[in-house]
Image (tube, coloured by chain):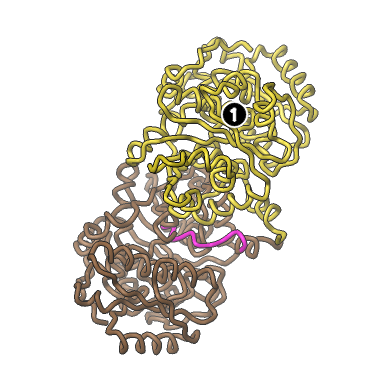
Chain colours: A yellow, B brown
């Protein structure tokens, strides 16, 4: 990687936020009496504060990291362009960030996205729609990375990886700065945040952003095939692969090396909790029907942990303290379709 | 009706807003580059500003009118209670408004809602969940009104009608006051607003709120069975019935008498435009997938007019003026479910 690296500190996140905040949406924070009641037990009120990154540009938080990574590159580097491999939200994020940085810098920044040949046509079209060149590869990570190297050798483009890089981590962490501010504005200062964990860039960023503030950070994973962080924490060793079983398709990624350094440190992340696909669907239905916002299944994972994971509920409710708990919940994205909803929910259980 | 009546003026709407604004959400206004592009032609940019009343309390704008109507009643009247007939959003709106007014006034305000026996169990449960008593009736309006009279004779309760009353109209109009303020805050002062038209309380309220401000007001109706306002304007006479064909179930209501007085006056409402159910579905899909918010089919009707009704597009684009147009679009509610979405969109066209 040719990106010069900043230290993973709260100060770096605040710097990142100052750099990108005029180029991203300060997404709203929603509350829901119904969902908060479901997350509460007995006398203990758990107030959920949903940070709605599904209402972010490109429909997901990934624009934060991509915008920040580009802001850290020099004109000289950017003239050669940027490249990444992604079939998901990062592809569109980098494409849009490159287009917007082009108008800020005053010259065209070439953006090349390596996507598996089997990617859905709508995602290819969306990425091209933001002005990126799409190059196709095989589906394995080795094939994708080989194709990235071909592009780099040809153009000198800088690789902006999807999640495992400090500048991406710091960019994603900016959402926690906003969420903490917004919680204060609502008169509900945060006690804790729960965030989904796939490649771990966002969870690590949120944890770094909150370090030293007293806000506890928790991760949420799908139990069915993609609980690599949970298993890694149990066994004291990073797990380098996942299966592609869960409906939470944005989280079918093992935690990156940089991110594991943060996530495996108890002083940053207090714990990772898992839920079943059935619980993810229940939570997704509740968010869509009660909060009236569209979320992708991955976004329902931390909601499902807050509602259905007994162990998490006991930890977060801090029994005996008799005080309400204000829990931030990261809604990571909303990039799904009515057809996918029909596919997920169409067959009655 | 035993509600004393205020005049239908912009001043009355501003008074209503001052009375209710601490008890309702100031719902957000969203923009969408994608949808605005679709509403534009050639050099003329139509910027859509969506007033998201689907994110209002009870998931629809109806809480505004109900809260205002209750605020206008005396303690003496409220002790005897309120009654209405509705199987839709007004039922929940009155139930919640009565519960909240009870805590403001310091005594329990009885609320009775007459619903057809065939109402969906979830709507009955939601209404009861807000603390109202549900009384069942037959499905015709005569049967419902007879049941209301029985309740009134027994209790002395005040009827708070769903749409055809000045206090309801003035309450619904408050959304236009906010929308105009929010458009200014966004640096996009409004040229026009398009609102759905069922019973017409909201369209009339929005028109009254904007009277004299230079903002043009348009109505939107489903063409398939519920275009009574459109036909009434064409023929110069209010149409008193609709068929229950359209998927926009919230708009299967003829315009009320009070509301017709406003809507049929060109100095208030510049025109009413219609769209097919197929266009309503296309618009609903776009709003859900691109803006990531859940809307009910009725809310998609003004969006569909802005995107697909040629006559409206020509009128709103004011050809030859060469200026961008800022068009407010009322998103009236989001009370639908994943199962209903599957019912609507499940069969491929």
Q: Quadrant of residue A248?
A: top right
Asked if the magenta segment contains residue B333, the reply would be yes
Asked if the magenta segment contains residue B48, the reply would be no
Compared to residue B60, the image places residue A149 above or below, namely above
Q: Where is residue A274 in the image (x, y as percent from the top left)?
A: 63, 39
Question: Which one is in front, A326 or B63?
Answer: A326
Compared to residue B103, the image places residue A151 above or below, namely above
Return the residue at label 1.
Answer: A95
Magenta region: B330-339
Q: Can residue B208 be seen in this view?
A: yes
Q: Quadrant of the C terminus of chain B?
A: bottom right
Q: Can residue B318 be seen in this view?
A: no
Badge 1: chain ID: A
- Is the stretch drawn in magenta largely helix, strand or loop? loop
> Label 1 crowding class (10 Å Cα cut-off): few <14, some 14-19, many 20+?
many
Question: Which one is in front, A346 or B96?
Answer: B96
Question: Which one is in front, A62 or A190?
Answer: A190
Q: Where is residue B159 in the image (x, y as percent from the top left)?
A: 31, 79
Q: Where is residue A13 in the image (x, y as percent from the top left)?
A: 45, 21
Question: Which one is in front, B36 or B65?
Answer: B65
What secondary structure is marked by label 1? helix
Q: Quadrant of residue A142?
A: top right
Task: Report the residue that reaches farthest toward the front.
Answer: A320
Q: Quadrant of the N terminus of chain B?
A: bottom left
Q: Where is residue A160 in the image (x, y as percent from the top left)?
A: 61, 20
Residue occupying image coordinates x 76% and y 29%: A136
Compared to residue B83, the image places residue A317 above or below, namely above
């Amino acid at each position: 990687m040719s990106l010069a690296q900043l230290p993973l500190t709260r100060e770096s996140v605040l710097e990142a936020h100052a750099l990108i905040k005029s180029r991203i949406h300060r997404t709203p924070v929603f509350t829901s009496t119904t969902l908060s009641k479901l997350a509460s037990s007995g006398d203990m009120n758990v107030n959920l504060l949903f940070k709605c990154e599904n209402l972010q540009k490109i429909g997901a938080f990934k624009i934060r990291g991509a915008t920040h990574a580009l802001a850290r590159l020099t004109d000289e580097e950017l003239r050669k362009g940027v490249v990444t491999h992604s079939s998901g939200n990062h592809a569109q994020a980098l494409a849009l960030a490159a287009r917007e940085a082009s108008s800020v810098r005053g010259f065209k920044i070439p953006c090349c996205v390596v996507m598996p040949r089997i990617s859905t046509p709508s995602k290819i079209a969306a990425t091209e729609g933001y002005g990126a060149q799409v190059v196709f590869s095989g589906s394995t990570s080795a094939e994708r990375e080989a194709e990235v190297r071909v592009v780099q050798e040809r153009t000198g483009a800088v690789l902006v990886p999807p999640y495992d890089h400090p500048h991406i981590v710091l960019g994603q962490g900016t959402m926690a700065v906003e969420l903490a501010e917004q919680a204060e504005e609502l008169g509900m200062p945060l006690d804790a945040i729960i965030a989904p964990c796939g490649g771990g860039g966002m969870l690590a960023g949120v944890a770094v952003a909150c370090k030293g503030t007293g806000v506890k950070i928790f991760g949420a994973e799908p139990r069915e095939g993609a609980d690599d962080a949970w298993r890694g924490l149990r066994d004291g060793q990073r797990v380098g692969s996942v299966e592609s079983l869960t409906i939470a398709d944005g989280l079918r990624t093992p935690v990156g090396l940089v991110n594991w350094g943060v996530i495996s440190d108890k002083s940053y992340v207090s714990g990772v909790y898992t839920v079943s696909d059935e619980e993810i669907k229940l939570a997704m239905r509740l968010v869509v029907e009660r909060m009236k916002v569209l979320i992708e299944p991955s976004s329902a994972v931390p909601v499902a942990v807050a509602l259905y994971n007994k162990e998490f509920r006991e930890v977060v409710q801090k029994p005996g303290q008799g005080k309400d708990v204000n829990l931030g919940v990261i809604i990571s994205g909303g990039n799904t379709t009515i057809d996918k909803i029909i596919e997920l929910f169409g067959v009655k259980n």
